[in-house]
Structures are given as C-alpha cells and as structure tokens.
C-alpha cells in the first residue's frame, strides 16, 4: 500500500494534463460527434482513422480532393496514415455515399464532398476542380440507354486553360 503513495503524487500533474486535454477535446467535441454520426449513418464503423479523415474532408464545407492531396493534408495534420489507406478510405466513403467520384482524366480521380448532381470546371494548369453553379449546362442528344438501364447522371467537365490574348487575336483574322 505504501508504494501507492508514489503514483498518487505523480497523478496530480498527470490529472492537470488531463484537464488540459479534456478542454481541447471539448472544443473539438462538436466536430467529433458530428463525424461519428456521419460515419455511423453511412453504415461505416467510426474508427479513429476514419474520423480523422472525415474531419479533414467534411469540416470545412465543400471541396474536391485527390488521394495525394488528402494524404499530404493528413500528414501535415499529424494523422499517421499511408497513401494506400487514404485510397481505401476514399473509396469506402464513396461507396457509402459520403463522396462523389469525379474522373477528370485516366490518371487522376477527384473526390467531391458535394454529392449532389453538379458539373465542374477543371483548371488544367493547377489540376484544380471547381463547381459550376446552377444548371447552366444542357446536354442534347443523349442516346437512349439500353433496355433495363437508366441514366443516373451526366458528368460534364469543362476544361480551362489560361486565355492567351495574342493567340486569340491571331485567330480572329
Ligand atoms: Zn464539385
């Protein structure tokens, strides 16, 4: 019993550390609870890693990420996670309906936190994807889908390059 005196004394600073930690956690409680609920409602087990990645993805409004950009962000935020795990998680989130996959070219897949039906500008120089607001794109001449199939949605990616005034005036003639 006498040996317990040691640990008890030590527990005083440890407890104040805990208080600080609890305060930090309290400020993050809302987001933590929100991500847990989000994952559970999507039918995913809210593991620590999924929660950390969900917070990076969904805490700041709508955004478009690639596995690589999210991986960099996770490392910067001190979330120890491999690129392979990021890929798996992004695909799991997509299957669960939390993300929408936007294929821009064969080499790059973007994941959109806005799962609604919308189209995109793609700035080729920066590899950046931007939402096109509103329903400004009308697609004509969509072929009839084969029997038993229905169109889920049509993805339009409008590719942008920098306007080159010199080149433009040369074209005018
Ligand atoms: Zn989007």
Image: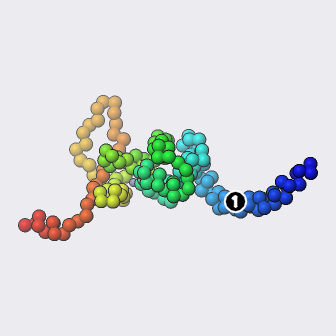
| Front residue of 13 and 24 | 13
For disc 1, the marked residue is 21
At 55% across and 53% down in the image, what residue appears?
A: 79
User: Residue 32, percent across and down?
Assistant: 61, 54
What residue is shown at x 35% (from left), y 58% (from top)?
128
Q: Quadrant of residue 55?
A: bottom right
**Residue 60 drawn at (x, y percent):** 50, 60
Q: Nearer the viewer, residue 31 or 86?
A: 86
Colouring style: rainbow
In this view, 146 is above or below 66:
above
Image quarter where the C terminus lies is bottom left
Q: What residue appears at the point 40 percent right and 46 percent down from the top-left corner?
A: 101
Quick one: SS at disc 1?
helix
* 19 left or right, relative to 163: right
Q: Residue at x 48, y 59 (%)?
A: 61
Count of picture labels: 1
The answer to whether 32 is drawn above or below residue 168 in the figure is above
Left or right position of 56 against 12: left
User: Can I make out residue 136 in this image?
Assistant: no
Most extreme residue toward the right is 2
Q: Spot the residue most to the left.
A: 173
The front one of 47 and 97 is 47
Counting from the top left corner in percent of width and height, residue 62 is at: 45, 57
Q: Is mark 1 within 8 Å of ligand 1?
A: no
Residue 12 position within the rendered picture, expressed as x and y whole percent measured from the top left: 81, 60
Q: Is residue 7 visible?
A: yes
In this picture, residue 19 sits left or right of residue 127: right
Tell me if mark 1 has few (under 14), some (14-19) or many (20+) residues whose alpha carbon lies within 10 angstroms of its own. few
Residue found farthest to the top: 147
Q: Quadrant of ligand 1?
A: bottom left
């Amino acid at each position: 019993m006498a040996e317990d005196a040691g640990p008890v004394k030590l527990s005083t600073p440890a407890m104040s550390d805990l208080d600080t930690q609890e305060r930090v956690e309290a400020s993050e409680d809302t987001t933590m609870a929100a991500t847990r609920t989000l994952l559970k409602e999507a039918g995913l087990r809210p593991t620590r890693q999924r929660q950390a990645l969900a917070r990076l993805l969904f805490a700041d409004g709508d955004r478009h990420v690639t596995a690589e950009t999210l991986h960099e962000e996770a490392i910067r935020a001190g979330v120890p996670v491999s690129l392979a795990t990021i890929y798996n998680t992004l695909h799991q989130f997509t299957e669960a309906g939390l993300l929408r996959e936007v294929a821009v070219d064969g080499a790059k897949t973007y994941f959109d936190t806005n799962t609604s039906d919308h189209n995109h500008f793609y700035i080729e120089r920066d590899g950046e994807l931007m939402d096109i607001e509103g329903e400004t794109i009308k697609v004509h001449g969509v072929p009839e889908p084969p029997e038993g199939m229905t169109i889920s949605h049509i993805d339009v990616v409008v590719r942008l390059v920098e306007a080159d005034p010199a080149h433009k005036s040369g074209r005018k003639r």
